[in-house]
Each structure stands twice: as C-alpha cells, then as structure tokens.
Image: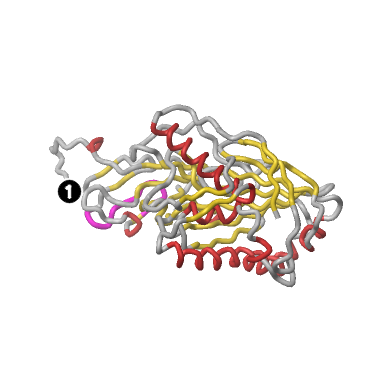
Amino acid sequence: MTSSSTSFSLHGGNSFLRNIWYYGLPAADLKPGRCQAKVLLGEPILFCRTTSGKPFALRNLCPHRGMPLHYGRFDGKEVECPYHGWRFNAHGHCTLIPSLTSDSDVDLKNFGVLSYPVREVQGNLWIFFPANGRNVSEPTLEVPLVPGFSAETQPQAVQKFIFPGHLDQVFINFMDPSHAPFVHGAWWWRKRGKLFEKAKTFDPSPYGFTMRRHPLLRKSWAHHLLGGHPEVEIIYRLPGIRIETNYSDRHTFCFLITLTPINDQETELTATYYWTFPWLAPLKPLLAPLAREFLNQDLRIVAKQSEGLKYKPPLTLIKEADYQAKWYYQLKREYEKATQEEREFVNPLKTQVLRWR
C-alpha cells in the first residue's frame, strides 16, 4: 500500500463468494404455507415456509424435466411439481413419483433437489450457498447480526432496490468515503460539493473491517433527531453487508444494508432499519421517502457508472480514500483461497487510521 494508485478491474462473470451467508429476503415476506421464487447468484431458488412456521429453501428446478417448482403446489410441508407430480420435502428429498408402479424397484433416495441452509434472525432470512453445489450440513459460520438488538427483534422498516451492477461495483460504492458531497447533495441532507478533512480508525472485524465508533463532529438534521451526543460505528462484512449504528445517550438507530447478487449485472439491495426511539414510528411516513431518495441517489450513480463499465476501461484506486475498496478485494481473495483450500478464513487486515477529504 505504498504506491499512490493501483489499477484494477471490477470482477465480471459469476465471481461470487461461496460457503457464506447471503441475505435472502425479509422474514415477513414469507408467510406460513407460502413460497416465493427468486434468482440469487444466478441460481433459481424457492423459499418456502411450512404451516408450522419453519423456513426452507430449495433449488427451484425439478430434477425430472427441469420444471420450475414454484409453478406447482405447496401443501405447507412438501412441494409438488406441476408437470408429473413429483414431491419434495423441506430437505429436498423426493418423497413421491406418482408414475411408479407398486412393484417398482426405483429408489426415491436417488432423486432430490439441492436444499440450501436457511436461518431466520432479527426478521431476516439468510441463505447459505455451498461451494460444491451439493447439500451441506448445518454451517458453523454464524449469520451476521445487527449489534445491540436481540435475535428476536423485528425491523421497523424495510426498503428494496435493484441496482444495475455487479456486487463488487455496488458494494464499493457503499464503502466509498468521498462520493457523498457529489452524489448525496440535497436541501434536506447536505450542500453538494462541500468538502472537509476526515480521519477515522479502522479495525479488522469478523469477515471484514469496522470504522471504529466515534463521536460525530458534524451533524446532519437526521443526527440532531437522535439528540444527546451521537456516535457512529460502521461495519463492512463479506459478502456484501454494511451495518451503520448510530448511538445517542439513550437510544440506538441501526441501518443494515445487504447486497445479494441476482446475476453478474444486477444486485438486490435490501435496507433494513432498527431503532429504539419510541417516538420515531409516527415519523415513518415522512422519513421513508427521504431514506429511499438517499439510496436512489446511489442507484442512479451506479447506473451511470455501468454505462462506462461496459467498455471495460482501466480503473484506478488512489491512496487512503480508496483503501476500503482495496481491503474488500483483499478480503475477498483470502476468502476464496480459504474456501478452495478448505481451511478457516484468516482476516489479513490490521488496524489503520485513514485520512481523506
């Protein structure tokens, strides 16, 4: 990290981390006895919730003729393919092939669909993508948690976006410390183009790095709503997770951004909000459009950037203002290597103070 700049290229193709948890969908979106089909990491996924409330996820393709299973029937326990009636349970095991006769020697254990581990915490459904494309036992890797809130906490608000860019491109935008004065100018937030110097301490943290908790020297109107002496901490974590926690003297406001690739050209962003302010709920109709516009500003700039990236130009990362992007690529390479070598991931980062304008 001694050179003044580094040339690089954003990942193309299906360059997504495996053996790691990705955000699936808000838990409230999946009702008991219902299913929801999605495409994540270029794979067709069917999320289901049993009538007893347990969520699960299957590869959304029948192994018989490739029929998407979401066109079939779900009875609250098993999914039935609409083409020939094959049935699959929550583990992906085939339980019935109606065309077989009573004396058939076909073993149903030889048929099934990939089952993805799913966990439900803090009102979110997380899905684990294995490296080998085969069923795996329950992962030992813990799902990301929003600090300061219990596993049973439900979010106060959720917003969804589709960003027209690769996961790497979108995530770098959300760790970029110097774009805000140019992208996020608005009368209700900050004056466009206004710059001032910053110095922040960053520490390695589980599967990523953290901007150490610090007091806010310059407060927006939103921070004034927190009252007291607001402080902020921002966590960045593989594969595409940003957790910003704002602390006041008595209360906490947390802003969780999760990025899940749909394919190599689209990324699903889910913004999930948690807070302990009892008076904030009535303000949601006023604040929600402002929060959405703030993220739409990021979406629009990423969309414009995508126009240029189609020509595969050489790109440059300069010194401290872009170190976080460098760290992301360093973490990603190490995680990919650890997965290939079937060993534990070791965070390669060290504590460092960054300065930028």
- Quadrant containing the C terminus is bottom right
At label 1, counting other C-alpha atoms closer than 10 Å, the crowd grade (few under 14, some 14-19, many 20 or more) is few
Of 192 and 108, nearer the camera is 192
Along the horizontal axis of the image, is 167 left or right of 74?
right
Q: Secondary structure at mark 1?
A: loop
| Residue at point 73%, 52% (across, down) | 253
Q: Where residue 177 sits: x, y (%)?
A: 65, 54
Q: Can you say whether 139 is above or below 15 in the image?
A: above
Q: Where residue 6 sits: x, y (%)?
A: 52, 48
Q: Amino acid at mark 1?
A: Ser
Is most of the magenta stretch helix, strand or loop? Answer: loop
Q: Where residue 188 sits: x, y (%)?
A: 74, 70
Of 313 and 251, nearer the camera is 313
Write down the residue under mark 1: 99
Q: Can you say whether 353 is above or below 224 in the image?
A: above
- Quadrant containing the N terminus is top right
Q: Which residues are magenta?
A: 74-84
Q: Can you say whether 63 is above or below 224 in the image?
A: above
Taking the magenta stretch, the answer to whether it contains residue 65 is no
Instruction: Answer with the quarter of the image where residue 28 lies.
Output: bottom right
Instruction: Answer with the quarter of the image where residue 166 lies.
Output: bottom left
Q: Where residue 314 sits: x, y (%)?
A: 45, 56
| Residue at point 54%, 35% (across, down) | 142
